[in-house]
Image (cartoon, rainbow, N blue to C red):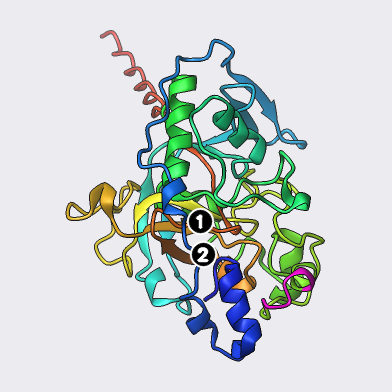
Amino acid sequence: MIRHPLSAAACALLLAGSLSAPLSALAAVKPKAAAAAAPTSDTPAAVSRDPSCTTTRSRSADGRIGYFRHCPDSPDMVSFRGGTYRMGDGIGNGQNFEHPAHEVTIKPFAIGRYEVTRGEWQACVAAGGCTAPMTPPEATEAGPRHPVNSINWLQAKAYVAWLAQRSGRPYRLPTEAEWEYAARAGTDSHYVWSMGNVDVVTCNYANALDLSAGARHPELTWFIECNDGFAETAPVGSFPPNRWGVHDMIGNVWEWVEDCWHPDYTGAPTDGRAWLDSGEGANCKKRVNRGGGWGNGASALRLSSRDADPAGNHSSGLGFRVALSVAAPPPAPAAAPAPVPTP
């Protein structure tokens, strides 16, 4: 399965005569991280809590969903009470690493309404907490509302550490279980949509490898027969949100999460925490990313689809969104006892 758009070197190989190679073979050709430019720590330069960081609130256009943000240029967030859902491919025709489907109980948390944008990333760069993306964007994808991409996992960790210190709030990357819970928004289907020809309907709901992307990248031959109007990334919020008010969980860019990669869900936690084996911990060889990106067809945009990269890898189809730990609401007060009748 091709996840991220191919590197220039890979494209040159394809155009030299390998266009008939199977997709499974092409998937091994991935952009390589510029190791010298990658940060070696997820701890940003020391900063003080910013006094301009005060909580502001907004609502969706229909008034149904509430959002909040803690700083003027930090991501909009939406919070969830948590609950139990079935994670993975419950339909039975996904990849082996999407199995076994299993119940997971999620604690209250919040997640970004959108993928982290270039404008939000630049605020971190300007403050000294982040470094520039590994590869500069094309001019048409450089706007402040486009999702930041060409970010490796270590850079994403540096951003959430900077945001946590600046805001005084426990920002972090989402766990894989939290990510899928927010993406599914209560559905157990393959896709965020429920009907129609997948290759036609996809462009109504997600930024995928469509005709416009195929025109810019003729070497990417698996494009689908619809047109969403975006050759690469789209400004966040260009497509409808899911039922829980979160945009672009599917398509646009793949999103880093906290977890180490495991080849399937055998032994996965059932309490929503990140899956970090004691033998791997923070140094696991690969980190999971979810959601598909602009360089993928509909088969990669399924809600259970998953993949991973080494923490130092980056590509134009790889970004992230933030999560926030939220205190559980207090339990409801016990009902008052019935009065005892007087004899």
Q: Which numbered disc flags the more N-terminal residue, 1 or 2? A: 2
**Is residue 218 rendered magenta in the image?**
yes
Q: Quadrant of residue 215?
A: bottom right
Q: Is mark 1 on a helix, strand or loop?
A: loop
Q: Mark 2 points at which residue?
A: 31
Q: Which residue is drawn at 40% across and 47% down?
A: 175
| Labelled pair 1, 2 in contact (Cβ < 8 Å) | yes
Name the main secondary structure of what is drawn in magenta: loop
The image's mark for residue 222 is none
Residue type for callout 1: His
Name the spot of residue 87 as percent of width and height, x first: 42, 60
Residue type for callout 2: Pro
Visible residue check, residue 174: no
Q: Mark 1 points at which residue?
A: 314
Name the spot of residue 202 as percent of width and height, x first: 71, 67
Q: Residue at x 59, y 21 (%)?
A: 71
Q: Residue at x 82, y 61 (%)?
A: 229
Q: How many marks?
A: 2
Q: In which quarter of the image is the C terminus?
A: top left
Query: Relative to residue 88, is residue 23 drawn left or right?
Result: right
**Is residue 284 rendered magenta in the image?**
no
Query: Relative to residue 240, is residue 98 drawn left or right?
Result: left
User: How busy is the neighbourhood of tag 2: few (under 14 within 10 Å), some, or many (20 plus)?
Assistant: some
In the rendered image, the residue lying farthest to the front is: 36
Q: Is mark 2 on a helix, strand or loop?
A: loop
Q: In which quarter of the image is residue 143?
A: top right
Question: How far separated are the C-alphas under marks 1 and 2?
Answer: 6 Å
Give the vertical position of 201 relative to 253 (above or below): below
Q: Residue at x 69, y 26 (%)?
A: 58
Name the spot of residue 107 as percent of width and height, x first: 38, 39
Q: Nearer the viewer, residue 242 or 168?
A: 168
Per the rendered image, the range of residues in magenta is 215-220
